[in-house]
């Protein structure tokens, strides 16, 4: 076991849903703080950095591939690319094979931004995660992936049969 303590709230066993909601809220707050810090340091938003990273990882690539890789909707990717093009960090061009397909590549400025930008998760997380055993890292990755899948947008509870009154108390 690692030296990272897993400090659940005291009532986690009594009300795991409430504990989970608090933990997710803490994660959201940490991401918000990190996002603002990155924007202050680089002038780029978190989605802009994610798109730049996707382009770097995938090479000259279509916008739909970026959308899948970055877990963003196609319209969001297009809006982010608009801003990145304005900043001179990415260039879009039409495929020579199928003119309907738009490809994207990094510019030198985009590569430079990635080289100088801080890590998305922060040094504290990276250090703590590295101290975990490989089994703990895999278990955490699996649990967070499952959590993200379970939290994906679905129809509003008020639009489904039952409504808000049928939800757990901590979610209402």
Image: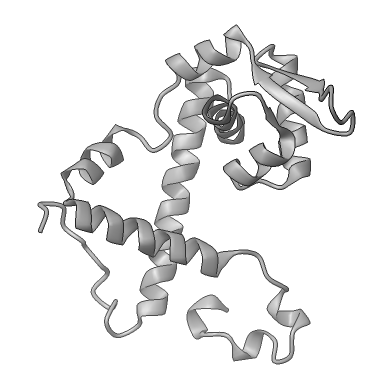
Front position in the image: 60 or 137: 60
Residue extending furthest toward the right = 99
Up/down of 67 relative to 118, above or below: below
Residue 119: percent from left, percent from top: 39, 29
Give me the residue at 16% from left, 44% from top. 131
Q: Foreground residue, 82 or 33?
A: 82
Is residue 157 found left or right of 56 in the rendered image? right
Would residue 23 appear left or right of 51 to someone viewing this image? left
Left or right position of 87 against 27: right
Q: Is residue 34 above or below residue 85?
A: below
In the rendered image of this protein, does residue 94 appear above or below residue 116?
below
Give how far across and how far down residue 34 sits, in percent. 44, 36
When asked about the image quadrant of residue 33, the answer is: top left
Quadrant for residue 126, please give it: top left
106 vs 28, left or right, is right
Residue at point 71%, 74% (across, down): 156
The quarter in which the N terminus is drawn is bottom left
Vertical relation: 75 (above or below) 119: below
- Quadrant location of the C terminus? bottom right
The residue positioned 25% from the left and 67% from the top of the image is 8
Q: As drawn, which residue projects farthest toward the top?
A: 108
Relative depth, front residue between 101 and 109: 101
Residue 93, by quadrant, is top right
Percent coordinates x, y for residue 110 in the rendering: 59, 15
> Which colour assignment does the render follow?
one colour
Say which residue appears at 59% left-offset and 42% top-offset.
70
The image shows residue 103 at horizontal and vertical percentages of 75, 26
Task: Give the total of numbered labels.
Answer: 0
């Amino acid at each position: 076991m690692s030296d990272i303590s897993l400090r659940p709230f005291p009532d986690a066993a009594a009300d795991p849903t409430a504990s989970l909601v608090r933990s997710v809220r803490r994660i959201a707050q940490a991401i918000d703080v990190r996002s603002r810090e990155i924007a202050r340091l680089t002038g780029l938003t978190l989605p802009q950095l994610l798109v730049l990273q996707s382009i770097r990882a995938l090479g000259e690539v279509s916008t739909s591939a970026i959308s899948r890789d970055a877990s963003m909707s196609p319209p969001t990717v297009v809006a982010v690319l608009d801003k990145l093009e304005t900043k001179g960090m990415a260039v879009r061009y039409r495929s020579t094979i199928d003119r309907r397909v738009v490809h994207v590549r990094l510019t030198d400025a985009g590569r430079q931004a990635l080289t100088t930008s801080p890590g998305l998760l922060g040094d504290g997380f990276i250090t703590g995660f590295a101290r975990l055993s490989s089994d703990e890292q895999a278990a955490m990755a699996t649990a967070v992936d499952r959590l993200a899948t379970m939290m994906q947008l679905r129809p509003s509870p008020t639009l489904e049969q039952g409504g808000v009154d049928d939800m757990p108390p901590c979610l209402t």
